[in-house]
Amino acid sequence: MRKGVLLAIGAYLLWGLFPLYWRLLEPAGAVEILAHRMFWSAVVMGIGITLLRRWREVRELSARTWLLITLAAVFVSINWGVYIYAVNNDHVIEASLGYFINPLVAVALGVVALREKLSPLQWAALAVAVPGVVLTGLGAGGVPYLALILAVSFGLYGLVKRVIGIPSAISLLGESSVLLAPALGFLVFLQTGGRAHFTGYGAWHIAAMVGSGLVTAIPLLLFGAAARRIPLSVLGFLQYLNPLTQFLLGVLWAGEHLAPTRWAGFVVIWVSLMVLSVEAVRRSRRRRTPARPGPMGESIPGSMQGGIDESSGQVAGAR
């Protein structure tokens, strides 16, 4: 279990440190960086699937699955693009807010789209989160659009991934393949128009652009290895290392100002997340409770509802 925890920490810290990497790719804009990330992710995943000899799984995907993969690709491209824009335009703290409230959005989507039933504690967590988001908006002088777009796009991405129900590596390859043509077309358009920032800034800049594919794949592989070794409830707690790292980078590295009202909003959201996490652990423990004989000899399960859904693990590498 110790190895699994270390792998998970490594994955979440790498995702949390993404702001440092995307800043290396300036003066390229967010859309150009996004196009490079799409293209090189497809290259890296293609090589990986070839080495693992899993192309048969790709060829066996149904037309319905490809439609869902395309929908997932749309949501993840929105998420990636807005995140890169936020980081490179001094909105690191707001980006972290988006991933702090994402679990709450995921719960809400579960109720609306999948008709999942919530416990009183989960309803309380959602109710507490709403004023927290309002406070952060007031502290920023308006609605935190970037955070909300990040949270909703990632939540919808997770919802589609849950419906797809295929391994994350195969899904990511499919999404990258869908995005490959428009990404390559845009990069060629920039290059032929003399507006590209791929060359002309040194070998390290080119290497960093190409490395965006590896940067996308490595945390996903670490997370996949961790998910096989430790309980999902532990992963649920560790996932907050990602937005917490981003938050600290925004305050300590980027020097972004955080008004008292926004501090209050973040505190309220953190309380909401603590409530949600405690409830997730409680449900996970109940689910692992061995069945015991009932009064008539029938088995009574420890819980009828699970804790943290495994589908959340399939989308963790989307940032």
Image (spheres, rainbow, N blue to C red):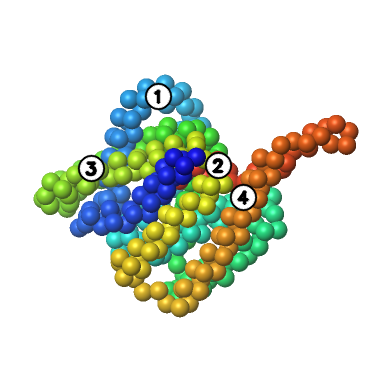
> Which of marks 1 and 3 precedes in the sequence?
1
Question: SS of the residue at dot 3?
Answer: helix
Q: From the top left corner, tell me how far across and down residue 41 is, in percent.
A: 32, 39
Question: SS of the residue at dot 1?
Answer: loop
Asked if residue 67 shows in the view, the reply is no
Marks 4,2: beta carbons within 8 A: no
Whole-Å distance between the Cαs marked 3 and 1?
A: 24 Å
Which of the numbered marks, if any, corresponds to residue 231? 2
Height in image: 221 above or below 236?
Answer: above
> Which of marks 1 and 2 precedes in the sequence?
1
Left or right of 287 on screen, residue 63: left
Q: Residues within 10 Å of mark 3 (few under 14, many from 20)?
A: some
Asked if residue 123 shows in the view, the reply is yes
Whole-Å distance between the Cαs marked 4 and 2?
A: 10 Å
Marks 4,1: beta carbons within 8 A: no
Which of the numbered marks, if any, corresponds to residue 281? 4
Q: From the top left corner, tell me how far across and down residue 262 is, in percent.
A: 46, 73
Residue 298: which quarter of the image? top right
The residue located at (47%, 73%) in the rendering is 263
Give, as a three-letter code, the residue at label 3. Answer: Val
> Which of marks 1 and 4 precedes in the sequence?
1
Marks 3,1: beta carbons within 8 A: no
Q: Nearer the viewer, mark 4 or mark 3?
A: 4
The residue located at (55%, 52%) in the rendering is 106
Which of the numbered marks, if any, corresponds to residue 210? 3
Give, as a three-letter code, the residue at label 1. Answer: Arg
Q: From the top left corner, tell me how far across and down residue 99 is, in percent.
A: 46, 57
Height in image: 236 above or below 135?
Answer: above
Height in image: 311 above or below 266?
Answer: above
Residue nearest the observer in this picture, 227 or 201: 227
